[in-house]
Amino acid sequence: MLKLSHGLWPILAGVSVAASAETFELRDNAAIRGRLLAEKEGHLVVDVGYTVLLLPREAVLERIADEAPAEGGAATGTEVRHATGGNGLFTVSTGRGADQSVRELARRLGEAVVQVRTPGGLGSGFFINEDGYLITNFHVIEGETQISIEVYHERDGQLDRHSYKQVRIVAMNKFADLALLLIEDPGAPRFASVVLGDADGLAVGERVFAIGSPLGLERTLTEGIVSTKTREMEGDLYLQTTAQINPGNSGGPLFNLRGEVAGVTNMKLMLGEGLGFAIPVERLTYFLRHRDAFAYDNDNPSNPYRYLEPPRRASADARP
């Protein structure tokens, strides 16, 4: 079999699919246009018409998808770009698609939002890829090692609840209040996932919505607007939103109307209403790109969260 450049291999020919075409921009200024058939671990399966190629994820710098045609008409021509990040760990939107209704987005994105349970409480989270990697807040899992993830799979138009109990902490950053988890249950399926957006592209007054488990009420959706993008708290900037955020929402996604994650909800002011806050998605992508620096290993003496005892002030009668 002939090996193509970038490690791309033809695997079969003559496959027709109904999916819309995409342009896959590769390294060395190369590009391939075709239809995505499937996403495998480490590879994308793409039909280019005369054959099907297996593209290594690390070779794909960007995916540019044609927008689906409007009913009874042609495509609008609006370009939506998705750039893979972190060796395919997550996907970032780098273009601007059309806004959609909250109702449609909730139907499409709800399966990717999960409930995170520990012996000490619960929170929310969301999948960033189909392999079971998900994001939540550090404070949701702080001090916990027994973590379970409640997922609602959609099958035949019905929601099928499943609890996954073999969950590994991959990385966490206490100061950014972020944690990366991985479901390792044998036989776990591919999971619905979300695309990360651009909080810088948000405008004050723009509509956003959150999905999570406030007070344990899973799959709860709340809608609001961006109140400000620059609310400073303890040296960091947060998105402030009127979307209702309550205990249990922590770690869940705050979406824009293009269905992209704009932030990670993590707190509210308890003495008022409509005063919720989210970590801007740029801090999340920074955490994910540098996750090796925050890797969690309880057996590693160099673990960044295993601190030495602080020095104590010497007593007045102490002698050298």
Image (cartoon, rainbow, N blue to C red):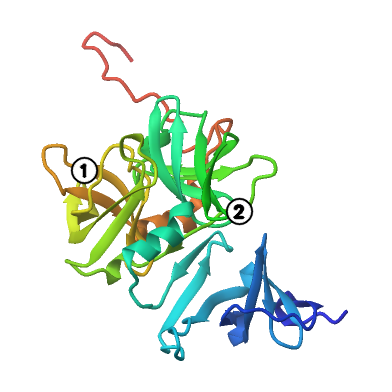
Quarter of the image for residue 269 reads top left
The residue under the point 37% across, 48% down is: 252
The residue under the point 61% across, 79% down is: 27
Q: Residue furthest right?
A: 1
Amino acid, disc 1: Lys
Residue bearing the label numbered 2: 131
Relative to residue 209, is residue 300 depicted above or below? above
Amino acid, disc 2: Asp
Instruction: Quote the CA–CA distance across marks 1 and 2.
Output: 31 Å
Describe the element under mark 2 as helix, strand or loop. loop
Query: Is residue 108 visible in the rendered structure shown here?
Result: yes
The quadrant of the rendering that contains the N terminus is bottom right
**Going by the image, does 262 lie left or right of 291?**
left
Query: Is residue 292 visible in the rendered structure shown here?
Result: no
Relative to residue 205, is residue 234 depicted above or below? above
Mark identifier at residue 268: 1
Q: Nearer the viewer, residue 284 or 203?
A: 203
- For label 1, the crowd category at 10 Å Cα-Cα, with few meaning under 14, some 14 to 19 and many 20 or more, is many
Picture coordinates of residue 104, whole percent (x, y)? 39, 65
